[in-house]
Amino acid sequence: MFPGVSPVPESAPSPLVLTRRSPQPPPPPSLAPPLALALSADERSRLRGQRRSLCGQELLLQLERGAPLQPGEWLSGARGGPAVQVVAAPETLLRVRAQAPLELLQAAYHLGNRHVALELRATELRLLDDPVLADLLGRRGLLVDRLQEPFQPEAGAYGSSHGSAHSHGSVHSHG
């Protein structure tokens, strides 16, 4: 080594490039065990970009534009390599419950009118944590608490995940 010259750092390994998606695991092209990719609901709608598997493997998503990734879906590269399974990452959510079903329906209506992404369950609504909405719902007499769980919002009338744009056209207005 020469004085004043730093050693050249080793280059980071190339990321695993993922270009294919499937509801079924791909046939095992290698002996490498499958990887898990934990993504938030919002991240599952972004089909391109750098990610990191749960074990730290660098990944590069280069998927065709389309529907958001779904938990349980499998990703793979064009040249094989380890398969990668999509999992829903835990997120801080508001769980909304009511004394009467009508109160819960009214809450869903008001949240939907604000274009809030919702996960609908038989006796509760779930949405991403938002202190303003928590206060609004609490003032309506609803039971609101926070929890840390995966968020799987409804796709909505336009078939895309939350956060995606949709046309209002002449279907409805917010007058």
Image (cartoon, rainbow, N blue to C red):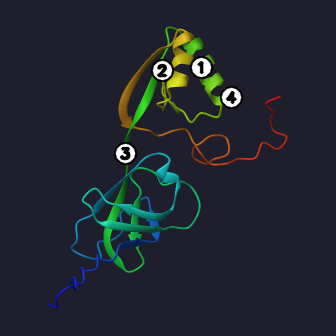
Q: Amino acid at mark 1?
A: Ala
Image: 2 above or below 51: below
Look at mark 1 in the image and give the residue it sits on.
107
Q: Earlier in the sequence, mark 4 or mark 3?
A: 3
In space, the residues marked 2 and 1 are separated at their CA atoms by 9 Å
Upstream in the sequence, badge 4 or badge 2? Answer: 2
Q: Is 111 above or below relative to 13?
A: above
Task: Give me the disc on residue 89.
Answer: 3
- Asked whether 5 or 13 is in front, the reply is 5
Work out whether mark 1 precedes mark 4 in sequence or the reverse, and give the earlier one: 1
Image marks 2 and 1: residues in contact by CB distance under 8 Å: yes
Res 5 seen here: yes
Q: Residues within 10 Å of mark 4 (few under 14, many from 20)?
A: few
Which residue is pictured at 48% across the width and 52% down the height? 44
Tell me which label, 2 or 1, sits earlier in the chain.
Answer: 2
Badge 4 element: helix
Q: Please, what is the three-letter code of the amino acid marked with disc 2? A: Val
Q: Which mark is on residue 113?
A: 4
For label 3, the SS is loop
